[in-house]
Image (cartoon, rainbow, N blue to C red):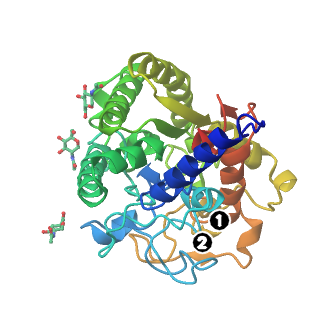
Amino acid sequence: MAIPVSSSGTFLSAVFLILLNTAILGAAHFWSPEKHAALFVFGDSLYDPGNNNYINTTTEYQANFWPYGETFFRFPIGRFSDGRLIPDFISEYAKLPLIPPYLKPGVRNYEYGVNFASGGAGALVQSHQGFVVDLETQLNYFKKVERKLRRKLGVGEAKELISSAVYLFSVGGNDYLSPFTFNSSFYDKYSKKEYVGMVLGNFTQVLEGIYKIGARKFGFLSLLPLGCLPGTKILQPGNTGACFKEVNLLMKLHNRAFPKALQAIQSQLKGFTYSKYGFYTSFSERLENPSKYGFKEANVGCCGTGLNRGVYSCGGKRAVKEFELCDDVSEYFFFDSFHPTEKAYRQLAKLMWSGNSDITEPFNLKTLFEL
Ligand SMILES: *[C@@H]1O[C@H](CO)[C@@H](O)[C@H](O)[C@H]1NC(C)=O
Ligand SMILES: *[C@@H]1O[C@H](CO)[C@@H](O)[C@H](O)[C@H]1NC(C)=O
Ligand SMILES: *[C@@H]1O[C@H](CO)[C@@H](O)[C@H](O)[C@H]1NC(C)=O
């Protein structure tokens, strides 16, 4: 801020400077949004930092055993990768500490944010029902966090923290996977278009709920080419190793309808701002042209068994016990049958953070944080 100083304005400026100083020193006692905008995270295994370690589920929905986590954390922390996930990189770029899992015992400081994501969760309660923390429950946890922040910081400061925070979502993949991996009877009752409408309808309700509490800044992903994951390819009848077309068709339907849903939300909720990252495009580019991005292998997973290591057995603690593990994880795009490596996540997170308008719209996450 420039403070004009002229001979006649010197005294006024000096008074102004004192007032300004007082304001800054006074504010220093409070939570200061200049220091950090908090990060709250919702969604599925792409973002789950280990919440599923603490729920009653099965190892199909957990990654808290070797060799998960081996590259970065050196121990199995519950992340579905060899190391860090997108929210971990985003918190680093935003100069925040690692954002902890909400369900981890002892996590009580929410001033930098907290992560509610649960591997296997979708927008619909039916998706992997009974084994995951569904999105509505994640919203209910957020409501509890907001009440605790209010008690700790007071109404005004809590409101400031909530409204300046960024809310990241990875939601939808499991709504389209669950019918093929878990239970198709709910999915079978609807046309594809109706089903997509229901997924986005439920997602929208949760976004409205979060907005109502005071959230304004949202970060989204388009859905990935889910049909091209090693673990999805093998789910199709007559398994040839090609991408599962029906699943990718659903992704495309969802990705076309999602921007319209966001526009509808924006026209109703004043101040709702978002950054959406073209995850489908970035992901596909790497699967189609791995060497351009420093990968030797984007077809076969590093850890698993069967065709393309598409059988979800990494770690030998799930239904299938045998698994193979690659020697050099840095050559691979996929760590297990369904999830990218830390190296892949880092590239994707970088683009989400600072990518230009080809891949982020209407702006990137860095800009969203700075608003
Ligand atoms: C955990 O879930 C299993 C199967 O759904 C159930 O049989 C068991 O009672 C549950 N345990 C607890 C402690 O809730
Ligand atoms: C499958 O989903 C249907 C409809 O939601 C439900 O009634 C049924 O109990 C589910 N079956 C299993 C095995 O979970
Ligand atoms: C949300 O999903 C349920 C099924 O779980 C469905 O019956 C309901 O219509 C959906 N809500 C919206 C607003 O789409």
- Count of residue discs: 2
**Residue 43 location (% of width, % of height):** 42, 49
Which one is in front, 341 or 110? Answer: 110
Which one is in front, 36 or 311? Answer: 36
In the figure, 108 relative to 176: above or below? below
Q: What residue type is labelled 2?
A: Asp
User: Can residue 66 be seen in this snapshot?
Assistant: yes
**Residue 360 location (% of width, % of height):** 67, 35
Q: Which amino acid does label 1 sit on?
A: Glu
**Residue 269 location (% of width, % of height):** 39, 22
In the figure, 294 relative to 366: above or below? below
**Residue 40 location (% of width, % of height):** 43, 52
* Residues at marks 1 and 2 touching, judged by CB atoms closer than 8 Å: yes
Label 1 to label 2, Cα distance in Å? Answer: 6 Å
In the figure, 195 relative to 181: above or below? above
Q: Which residue is labeled 2 in the image? A: 82
Q: Earlier in the sequence, mark 1 or mark 2?
A: 2
